[in-house]
Image (spheres, rainbow, N blue to C red):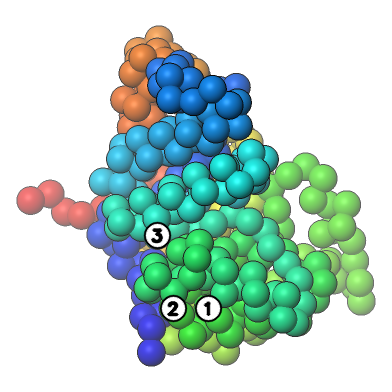
Amino acid sequence: MSIHYTTRLHQAIKAKGTPVLVGLDPRFDQLPPDVLAHARELHDDPVAVAASAFEEFCVRLIDVVAPLVPAVKPQAAFFEEWGPDGCLALARVIRYARKQGLIVICDGKRGDIGTTAEAYARAYLAGADPLAAAWQSDALTVNPYLGRDTLEPFVRVAKERGAGIYVLVKTSNPGSASFQDRKSDGTTIYRHVAQVVEELAVETDEQGYGLVGAVVGATYPQELLELRAAMPHVPLLVPGYGSQGGAAADVAPAFQQDGLGALINNSRGINFAFKAKPYDEQFGPRRWEAAAEAATKQMIADLAAHTSASQLIHPAG
């Protein structure tokens, strides 16, 4: 049997002493000038330029953060925008991150039923063996809108391969309330989804956490507190820290007392730290990698200072 996803995840978190998750969100109009210049030296076709630039940017960013954090989360949409070239770049980025020892969560928000859902799962969920799936990811974000049978094929494949899934439960975007906060049978839709996620996590639990996780936004700290209590066996993926307004104190409820149970994502705040104060003044675009490193270290320290992630810090010496 493959090593359980959360066993591998928590090993990685403990090894790095932090639950920071770095999102890989390459945006063409925000890339550093040296990355764009190099891609344009290599290619004439605009699509090839973008794909090449995305790959170089993400690989160099991975080199910066791999010694510091346990996991990265490439956002598939930014790559897919550039067609086959972009998809090939995504595959190479995932492969490179795995080789650097990182847990890779592909943010694809896939969701379907029956054999189609199983095909998505088999395509993305490699789990413990990177060669078990074409996309080589450890985990995948999943949209539950079609119902419980959306999730079950993903769960089966994940269990088989030692992979994980993260189900959208209460997302960080302002418009999430349009559907997620509506009530059915006296309970919000997101609580109905949370109940199913907890049930599936309990079924796959081997060590306190199942392989079925949940996406719960830092921008809704009260709901995060509520959902942590409602899903005690569920590993959380928490977006919304930093650029979207979530602070370390807002994500504190995501963790158990030992500092485990959640990954806190930061994408733009690390990817493009060189554009934001104080890093723009200190580093500028020429030293964008140093800015990303400084932003990552600052986030690690921020979480350690304001959450139980402090329990993960290795003692000196």
**Residue ranking furthest to the top:** 281
Q: Pinpoint residue 299: horizontal percent, then vertical percent.
A: 41, 38
Which type of secondary structure does the marked residue at label 2 adopt? loop
Q: Amino acid at mark 2?
A: Gly
In this view, the residue in front, 125 or 159, is: 125
Q: CA distance from mark 3 to mark 1?
A: 14 Å
**Residue sitting at x 58%, y 85%:** 156
Q: Is residue 63 above or below residue 163?
A: above
Residue 289, given in percent of the width and then of the height, sits at 34, 27
Label 3 element class: strand
Question: In the drawing, what numbered circle is on residue 103?
Answer: 3
Q: Which quadrant does the N terminus fall into?
A: bottom left
The x, y position of residue 140, in whole percent, is 57, 63
Residues under numbered marks 2 and 1 in contact, where contact means CB atoms less than 8 Å apart = yes
Is residue 188 or residue 114 the one in the foreground? 114
Identify the residue position indicated by label 2 in the image. 162
Instruction: Report how far apart the C-alphas of labels 2 and 1 lie in the structure.
Output: 6 Å
| Disc with the residue nearer the chain's start (3 vs 1) | 3
Residue wearing tag 1: 158
Q: Quadrant of residue 199?
A: bottom right
The residue that appears at 55% across and 81% down in the rendered structure is: 157
- In the displayed structure image, the side of residue 220 where residue 138 appears, left or right: left
Q: Residue at x 70, y 75 (%)?
A: 117
